[in-house]
Each structure stands twice: as C-alpha cells, then as structure tokens.
Image (cartoon, rainbow, N blue to C red):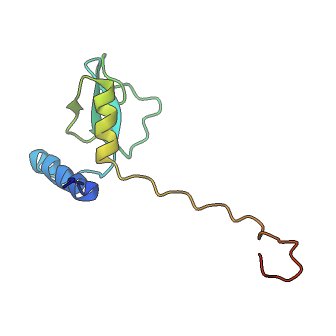
Amino acid sequence: MTFSPDLAALRAAAQREIERHADRPLPGTWRLVRLDDLPAIAPACDQDHRGRAPIHPGVDGLYDCCPQPWIRVGVLQVADLLLALLNQPAPAPAAAAGPEPVSDDPTGAWI
C-alpha cells in the first residue's frame, strides 16, 4: 500500500498550527527572507517597502510592518521546500486556443 498525503489538507493543518502559535490569523502566502544572515520564511506582507530600511543589519526582506512569525530555517533548499509546501500552487495557465485542425480528407471522416 502506498501512502499518498493530501497536500491541501496538510497545508491547511500546518497553517492552522502556525496561526495557533502566533495567536492570530496569518496571510496564506509565505515568502523567503533572510534573518540573521540565514534563510528564513515569513508570511507575506501587504505593505510597500520601497525606500524603507530593514529592521536591522543581517535581515533582508523584513520590516517593522511585516507579520510574524518569522521562521529561521538555516538551509536555503529546506526553506524553498517549506515555501513550496505552505503556499498554494498557482493555477495552471489555460492552454492558448489555436486554430482548429484542418484535414484535407474530402470525405470529412478525419478532422
């Protein structure tokens, strides 16, 4: 028997658990940041950060308005994996509609 986890259910459970520890609802999208010069993940922030300074040196992508928790991961590949697991996958783009296939069969049996 092969175990196939329901990633949507696991994603929702992980989000609920992180929100429980944070004592508040969090945005459902996570992003890569640097915390103390190490890879970390943080909830998405909806503020415009242009021209603002990070909260302190050694931090990249975190400002005083950014929601916590900020989770220090330490290994970039593991941070990328966590982001892939926590974030909803983007919907697949619809296939571009092209011209209808044309057949040179005069009987019309093949289209």
Count the marks: 0
Closest to the observer, 110 or 7? 110
- Is residue 63 visible to us here? no
Where is residue 73, by image quadrant?
Answer: top left
Q: Position of residue 84 (x, y in %)?
A: 34, 42
Closest to the observer, 100 or 34? 100
The residue located at (31%, 22%) in the rendering is: 59
Q: Position of residue 22 (x, y in %)?
A: 13, 45
The residue located at (89%, 80%) in the rendering is: 106
Closest to the observer, 9 or 27? 9
Closest to the observer, 96 or 32? 96
Q: Is residue 106 left or right of residue 43?
A: right
The residue located at (28%, 38%) in the rendering is: 82
**The C terminus lies in quadrant:** bottom right
The residue located at (46%, 29%) in the rendering is: 51
**The N terminus lies in quadrant:** bottom left
- Is residue 106 visible to us here? yes
Q: Position of residue 54 (x, y in %)?
A: 34, 25
The image shows residue 8, relative to residue 102, as above or below, that is above
Where is residue 16, by image quadrant?
Answer: bottom left
The image shows residue 108, relative to residue 23, as above or below, that is below
Q: Position of residue 92 (x, y in %)?
A: 50, 57
Q: Is residue 97 left or right of residue 79?
A: right
